[in-house]
Amino acid sequence: MLSTPNAPYAYVMDDIKGAKDVEASTSSTDTTKSKLTEASGIEVVDPQTLKVTLNGPSAYFLSQTALWTYFVINKKIVSQCAADKPSCFMETGKHLGVGAGPYVLDTWNHDQNLKLTINKNYWRPDKAATVEVEVPIVKDTGTAQAQFEKGELAVLDQPDPKDIKRIQGDANLKDLLHKSGFARTVWIGLNLKKGPFSPLNDAKATALRQAVAMGIDRQQLIDLALQGTADPVTTLMAKGVPGYHDFEAFKFDPDAAKAKLKEAGHEGCSGLSLTYTTRDREVEQAVATQIQAQFKDNLGCDIKVDVIPWTTMLAARQAHSYDMFYGSWGQDYPDPQDWLYALFDSRQIDVGNDPAYSNPEFDKLVEQANAMADASKQADRMKMYNQAEEMLLKDAAIVPLYQPSRYYEVQSNWTGYTTNAQFAGYFYLVKAK
């Protein structure tokens, strides 16, 4: 991973001694130097022991190691991939043994389906899988719901929010519906690198961002777009996660929002041409429709909505191509560092910091908190993250909207399927009744 240029999530290994050296070497165009392929802080002690040396104290490193970036894979198989296709081992079912889990990836037809077969050589027989799994990719939730009700699907993860009340009232379906917490929030991101919301400390750009923050009625958006299947949030971090801190930088106030528009030099939205860019999924499109309506009702602005395929949007959003855009994050590991450093530290601009937020005071707080590994100082550490989050919200780099609830349906002839707040489910637990 470290030797793959611009690999997603490479930052979670930055605390390992020598990791950044490998990343820098990989991206270097200097042909006079040999490419580094191994971090000095990673040492194989024996076939079942890995020794890792960090650059310094880290309070979150152990929780990071449970993330998929640290999953064990077979170097002999991975090394068969060409340099321009480093993930080739995931593309077919030929490279069996690449992973160490209870399943083998047998088939992956992109945008169609995945098939997992049981790993007969799994090293934990007490945790062995008993059922094979096929995951059809059904983009239309209405179609998926119909398939579930016909018994064609054993599980449906995240049914359409518009359908929840009907399902809850259906005698045949209500007991098949389950709900769990969701460590995810959704927000409007505002481009601080270019366009009308930039730069960060420009008085008129700041007033415009504040106008947007004051002009959104979160509860109405949830009621109309999501049929009440979410909770309003005014923070970046989701309620219930470690380090959560209740805070509201800007209350919903249409009159104050219009005053801020005037302060920004755009009274009545004159001189503004705004587009909200979102992903091509039904839920996000419904939310976008409500955002568009609220801009009109609360700010007097006619804005456009642009719906983009997700893979295209990810790259363009990271390149800061959109003025105003769909943003969301689901917790990868239970620590505020995963939210604040990964998404908004200036070091993450172009690799995860999509608004291009750059505030030296914010960076200082977050990076100091990152290094506070002393167990006796964790309360102080959380306060520093809280201060940094408040700074981000006061700067109105994002406009928090809601924290979704996670619903899923499971047929009555199966047991063991579940999903947690970090949207991880474990198929090896599933059994047929």
Image (spheres, helix red, strand yellow):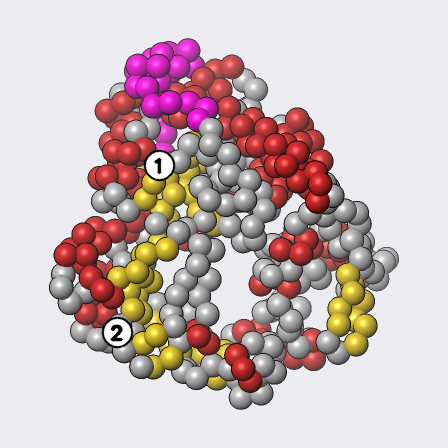
Return the residue at label 1.
232
Residue for point 66% across, 34% down: 380
The range drawn in magenta is 248-277
Q: Residue 201 lies in what quarter of the image? A: top right
Q: Position of residue 353 (x, y in %)?
A: 56, 40
Earlier in the chain: of badge 2 and badge 1, it is 1
Q: Give left or right: position of 34 versus 174.
A: right
Q: Position of residue 109 (x, y in %)?
A: 41, 74
Cα–Cα gap, marks 2 and 1: 33 Å
Q: Give left or right: position of 8 versus 112.
A: right
Magenta-span inclusion, residue 250: yes
Residue for point 57% across, 32% down: 386
Q: Give left or right: position of 151 versus 311.
A: left
Q: Give left or right: position of 104 versus 5.
A: left
Return the residue at label 2.
412
Q: Is residue 95 visible?
A: no
Q: Residues within 10 Å of mark 2 (few under 14, many from 20)?
A: few
Residue for point 42% across, 22% down: 250
Q: Is residue 269 above or below residue 242?
A: above
